[in-house]
Amino acid sequence: DDGALHGLCPRDMSASLGTLRRMCGHVSARMVVAAQRTKGVPTGRIAEVRIEQFAECAQVEVRIAVLGSAQAGKSSVVGVLAGGPGALDDGKGSARTLVMRHMHELETGATSSISQQVLGFDGASRLLNWTEELARTTSELCASSSRVMTLLDLCGEGRFLKTTLAGLTAHAPDYALLCVGADVGITAATRLHALLAAGLGVPVVALLCKADVADATSLGSLAEATLRLLAECGLPSPLYLESEAELE
């Protein structure tokens, strides 16, 4: 065999694709026939098949849409949480490179697509993404987790609003995490995202990011402004937590 492609007759092609489809069904995978062609093949036809294996997550899943204006720190928060022990940000955006999908996102720092990252928790509520030196795959996390949280990193720039709307609707998030950067404060995009989440009935959790670049007085003022924003959007009064123990 010199590696050259040899085609199949229509009958054999149909039987082969049927066998492959049944095999995918046994391993929780999806099969898509991308193309079939006869050009460049001595006899018969060949097929290009794409196979995607689904992670088997029978655990309880919570989906969280990460919202906020551009440069508010959304992708960095997601990258640190999902990336493991070595994912702490260096102050120059290193954490966000772990979740960005396209070269232009890496170059500009602006998210233009929907990036999904999975957090796995065991029965004691420990974050499994941080229990090993090397990051686990999605399948490994799902297999060893009691609960799973999917973070949907959405776009902050107005020109990608359609993509953000797709994340808030088609991906059916259970909660929204509204990131407010301490350096940029509440912007028009912050208000719009809060209104969209409120209008769709998605509960909102507010997170003040980049707290290290602001003093205590500025952070206090920003927290009060954020609470006013949530109230203006018609969202319920927030719960005040002063320690991690209150999360129990």
Image: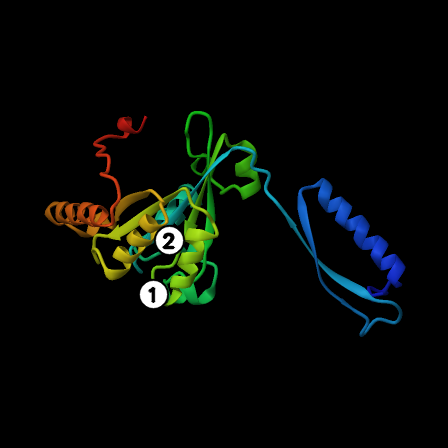
Residue on which disc 1 sits: 158
What's the residue at 21%, 32% (across, down)?
Answer: 242
Q: Is residue 230 left or right of residue 14?
A: left
Closer to viewer: mark 2 or mark 1: 1
Q: Quadrant of the N terminus?
A: bottom right
Task: Say the numbered circle drawn on residue 174.
Answer: none
SS assignment at label 1: helix
What's the residue at 45%, 60% (across, down)?
Answer: 113
The way the protein has been coloured in the rendering is rainbow
- Residue 84 lies, in percent from the top left, at 43, 42
Residue on which disc 2 sits: 75
Of 30 and 172, nearer the camera is 172
- Residue 64 lies, in percent from the top left, at 40, 44
Q: Is residue 149 left or right of residue 142?
A: left
Q: Amino acid at mark 2?
A: Ser
Residue 52 can be seen, yes or no? yes
Of 237 and 32, nearer the camera is 237
